[in-house]
Image: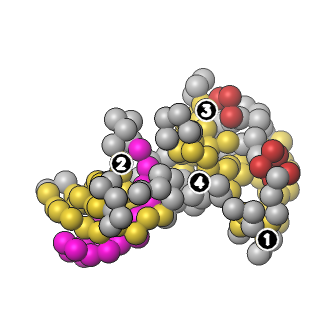
């Protein structure tokens, strides 16, 4: 079974002019991998590691690139667009990560850098982000591997936080 919001080992089953059809070796689940823009050689029957998410039409889409955070992980992300309904963050893959307004601790502006937790909506099975990470942190143990100080501008106030927070949730 393909795990949405996670890295999956899938097998290349077919190819068309737009990309590749990937199959889960255990279930009948399939995902579509758009043709990579970089010259990565992919062949039928190759086993490849991909990140899988649902697109706006609820199709399973795969990415060879690993996002900065998979579901259950945290990352320092930059807001690329801010709307009334929420904000979009550069997530390291072609699809930006959406943080709905009800998952924002404070108003987010384009260019803000904020620690985001990637989550999976159980009803829609879509990946989203949240800045309300306190409840997750309180229930977890962390292994912080590297800490570097840098300036962060959130809500137009200069604060100091850590970068390169290789945070691993030890309770999962």
From the viewer's perspective, is residue 134 above or below residue 150? above
From the viewer's perspective, is residue 63 above or below residue 11? above
Q: Could you tell me which secondary element the residue under label 1 belongs to?
A: strand
> Relative to 113, is 146 on the left or the right?
right
Q: Could you tell me which secondary element the residue under label 3 belongs to?
A: strand
Question: Which disc number belongs to residue 71?
Answer: 4
Q: Between disc 1 and disc 4, whose residue precedes?
A: 4
Closer to the eye: label 1 or 3:
1
In the picture, residue 141 is in which quadrant? Answer: bottom right
Q: Is residue 41 magenta?
A: yes
Q: Which residues are magenta?
A: 36-54
Question: In the image, residue 84 lies at what x, y percent?
Answer: 60, 23
- What residue is at 71 percent from the left and 67 percent from the top? 168
The residue closer to the viewer here, 96 or 63, is 63
Q: Between disc 1 and disc 3, whose residue precedes?
A: 3
In the picture, residue 146 is in which quadrant? Answer: bottom right
- What residue is at 82 percent from the left and 46 percent from the top? 134
Q: Can residue 38 be seen here?
A: no
Question: Which disc number belongs to residue 100?
Answer: 3
- What residue is at 29 percent from the left and 61 percent from the top? 23
């Amino acid at each position: 079974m393909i795990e949405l919001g996670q890295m999956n080992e899938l097998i290349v089953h077919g190819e068309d002019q737009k990309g590749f059809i990937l199959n889960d070796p255990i279930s009948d689940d399939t995902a579509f991998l758009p043709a990579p823009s970089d010259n990565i050689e992919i062949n039928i029957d190759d086993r490849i590691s991909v990140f899988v998410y649902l697109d706006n039409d609820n199709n399973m889409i795969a990415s060879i690139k690993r996002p900065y955070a998979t579901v259950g992980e945290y990352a320092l992300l930059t807001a690329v667009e801010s709307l009334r309904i929420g904000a979009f963050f550069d997530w390291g893959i072609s699809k930006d990560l959406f943080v709905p307004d009800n998952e924002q601790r404070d108003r987010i502006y384009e260019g803000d850098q904020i620690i985001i937790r990637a989550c999976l909506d159980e009803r829609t099975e879509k990946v989203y982000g949240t800045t309300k990470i306190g409840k997750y942190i309180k229930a977890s143990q962390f292994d912080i591997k590297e800490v570097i100080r840098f300036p962060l501008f959130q809500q137009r106030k200069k604060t100091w936080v850590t970068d390169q927070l290789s945070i691993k949730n030890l309770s999962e």
